[in-house]
Image: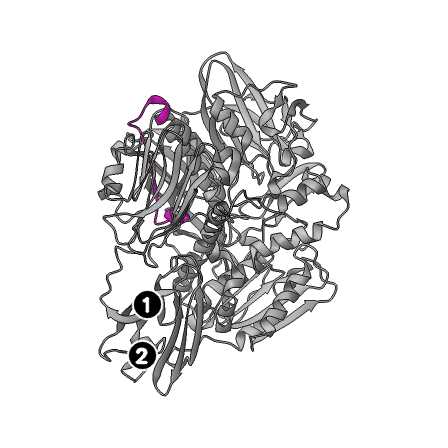
Amino acid sequence: MRKSQHFLTRIAILSFLIIISGYLYAQDKQGNIVQYFGKEKVEEINEGEVLHLFKEGLVLKKNGDRFSSNSVLSDPLFARILSDGSSGISEGIEEASENGLKWEKIEVGDKNDFDDRSLRSGYLYLEYNSKSAQTVLFEASGHTMVMINGMPHEGDHYDFGWNLIPLQLKKGKNEFIMSGGRFPKMRARLLKANKSVGFTKRDLTLPDMLVEENESLLGAIRVMNTNKNWFKGGSIVCNINGSELKSPIPAVSPLNVRKIPFSIPVPKDLQSEGKVQAVVSLKDKSGRVLDTDTIQLAVKSKYKHHKNTFISDVDGSVQYYSVAPSLDQDTENQAMFLSVHGASVEAVNQANAYQQKDWGHLVAPTNRRPFGFAWEDWGRLDALEVLSHSEKLLKTDPQHTYLTGHSMGGHGTWYLGATYPDRFAAIAPCAGYPDLLEYRQSFVRRMRDRPEEDFVRFGTTKAEFLKRAAGPTFDNNNEVLLDSMIRRAGNPSRTLKLKRNYLHHGVYVLHGEKDTVVPTFLARDMRERLGKYHADFAYYEYPNGTHWYGNHSVDWKPIFDFFQDRSIKESQDIEKIEFHTASPGVSATSHFVTIVQQEKPFEISSFTFERKKDQAVMGTENAESLAIDLKEMAVANDTILIDDQEVIVSKDDNAVYLKKTEGLWDIVEATYSKEKSPQRNGGFKDAFRHKMVFVYASKGSKEENEWYYNRTLFDAEKFWYRANGNVEIVKDTEFRTSNYVDQNVILYGNKDNNAAWDVLLKNSPIQVSNNQMIIGDKTLTGDQWGSYFIYPRPDSNIASIGVVTATGKKGMKGAYANDYLVNGTTFPDVFVFDHTMMKNGISGVKCSGFFGNNWSVEAGDFIWRD
């Protein structure tokens, strides 16, 4: 983390941009500043030769969409192109879908980038006339998404310079339509790949080698398959000074770039810190070498700052975290400090901002990427995985675990501290906003009084900004209810609704007195809120402090003094608990009580616990099923008083399960494995974990098969880019349940075109086929319907199926948007829409809602459009 950082306020999360001499820069994994392609940079392209550099195009100067607060996003231009089957774009043409805006000519500047403020919200159209059908790599930066010959692909809106999209050019005209990104610049070119299957070293994930250890390590490198055929049976061989390890490569689907884990040997003669060179070779199933490259790894002492890697249970990818180890070497049961970074900051730089302590280890997870997910969604899962992995590795004391972070990580501290309150003895948010939605609203409030010229840098006008930020307007009350149901799925992220969970631990709030990025009034507001109910918090405003005023913006001695005085109580010593959650699938447990099921899904549920004369006295809200660890609770009495009802329990039982029926609690058997539970509770985004595998349809028409494969590839690209992901893609006819035990499945297609449907969804209450969608007792007919929904995998007690489906061509293309892989978006268990949603937003939504606890429609909570 550098001592001075420049943050630009964004509508949802903080963005980080460094501008030096007109060039755009980003951080690599080691925190180095790296410039990606530009005219004046001397660079080596390892993946191929430049076939074409785009120097002219057309721009549609659209303003302000990035500031929309709608629950359902829309893209009228892409919707129009998908519906028409061709773009019809040329200079001077009015775009009816965008209120008659005209396509205007634009050319690159002397650094080969298209530079226009409107590119933050507008579109860039490029053409390439190919003399023949050929396979190339599309490399571009600065855009959110790109439609290539009618097919969607992930963009590079953070300007990392990593994106390489293999594609088959048509003979003749090929169209590339790029949507606006975070910055007002875009660049694009085509590369002729020098190998049909090979490495790219862009976006490596590597560990540090430690001189004190000799166990093999894990890294990840991307393998490009530019063929229209699958690459199967290959391997990666890693050699360091004669030590060698071979790692099998999972299948890489056609025209795909997949990030592959591989094992790294540690030489026996490793004695001093420095650098080592590793030679990695890519081999086919016969052992023939297809590509060879050299990568560099740092060699460090485990007693100094270093990086560790591990395999994530989310998707089988390799992730890293950084450690500032304790100065007290090799002593077990020390404290753990989990430090979560701000927007754009690498985890390695987060840890480097801290001096080593003499009583605990500091660990910095990645949030999956420097921007990641604002520590929600998959960022939340990353923080939990790193906490679990590092606790076991470092053998820390679970009673002395603490949480802190800066900026977006300050938000992460507020959020994780409220969501998992029994995991931390104290938390310390630094320069943080408590709630993502509240932060956005505070930004809007501040912008109301700004002059018109301040809106130019966002590519909009003040009036347009305020109109879009005001949120949607609805035609009727039914639409209000639909919107409310969709937003309810976001309640687990509404930190302020969980604020009483801070009673579990001490809270230290650190904020700069003159912070304008995360305004100081947000910290003062939390001070006021805490002051009304919390007896153990401290608040300090650093005099004249801005957003970042040096490493002591995070490494602040009074915080660690505050931590040192606090610990998590042993279960038998806990006298009171108050716990709140919006979803047991996100957070279910505090100490020895678990909320297993809710009465009303994704509304706030809670329990209270108090010891009174050796009896447990409990109260609940919106809880239908509970699990209680009687051994940990350690109450001598043989009854529990719950909601003023006495329940007799056996002292010989270690645990008891309670279910409420018609207002009365009864002891039941633990039979929740096939029902909703903390293991799988929905909504739709919850399907993207448990080493999910993407299964695409291949039994439909040529157009359907091509669309569903590319749609699957689009999601895999997005999860790689945003989540450092590694997703396996499987053809439906080759999917076997025995090969993916207890793994989540994302199924693309319907009953008629995906051969895996009947294997996985035969008994689902939602059945989708060509021209028909059945949901419980309702039937929708026509080819215009699409849906996203989640359902339990029938052969597993933990795994789920996420379904991206449609009744035909119109619905299939209406399901183009995949913002479910973006943080801040909300999706219930079931989301049904027609082909107009992409153009018109929520007016195209037909139904949204949640299954019942038995995963039925009848017991669920749904809103249908009249």
Q: Front-most of 381 and 277?
A: 381
Residue 144, how many percent across, how many down? 55, 36
Q: Amino acid at mark 1?
A: Leu
Residue designated by label 2: 640
Mark 2 or mark 1: name the one nearer the start of the chain.
Answer: 1
Q: Is residue 467 left or right of residue 796?
A: right
Q: Is residue 672 above or below residue 200?
A: below
Could you say whether the residue bearing mark 1 is in a helix, strand or loop? strand
Q: Amino acid at mark 2?
A: Ile
Residue 663, how many percent across, how many down? 32, 69
Q: Determine the CA span between mark 2 and mark 1.
A: 12 Å
Residue 692 covered by magenta stretch = yes
Q: Is residue 517 left or right of residue 259?
A: right
- Pointer 1: residues within 10 angstroms few (<14), some, or many (20+)? many
Specify start and end residues of the magenta stretch as a single range: 685-704
Could you say whether the residue bearing mark 2 is in a helix, strand or loop? strand
* On-image quarter of the C terminus: top left
Question: Can residue 1 be spotted in the picture?
Answer: no
Q: Is residue 595 above or below residue 465?
A: below
Q: Residue at x 31, y 29 (%)?
A: 770
Q: Is residue 54 above or below residue 319?
A: above
Residue 561, how many percent across, how many down? 58, 74
Q: Is residue 214 above or below residue 835?
A: below
Residue designated by label 1: 626
Residue 859 image label = none
Residue 627 covered by magenta stretch = no
Q: Residue at x 26, y 74 (%)?
A: 654
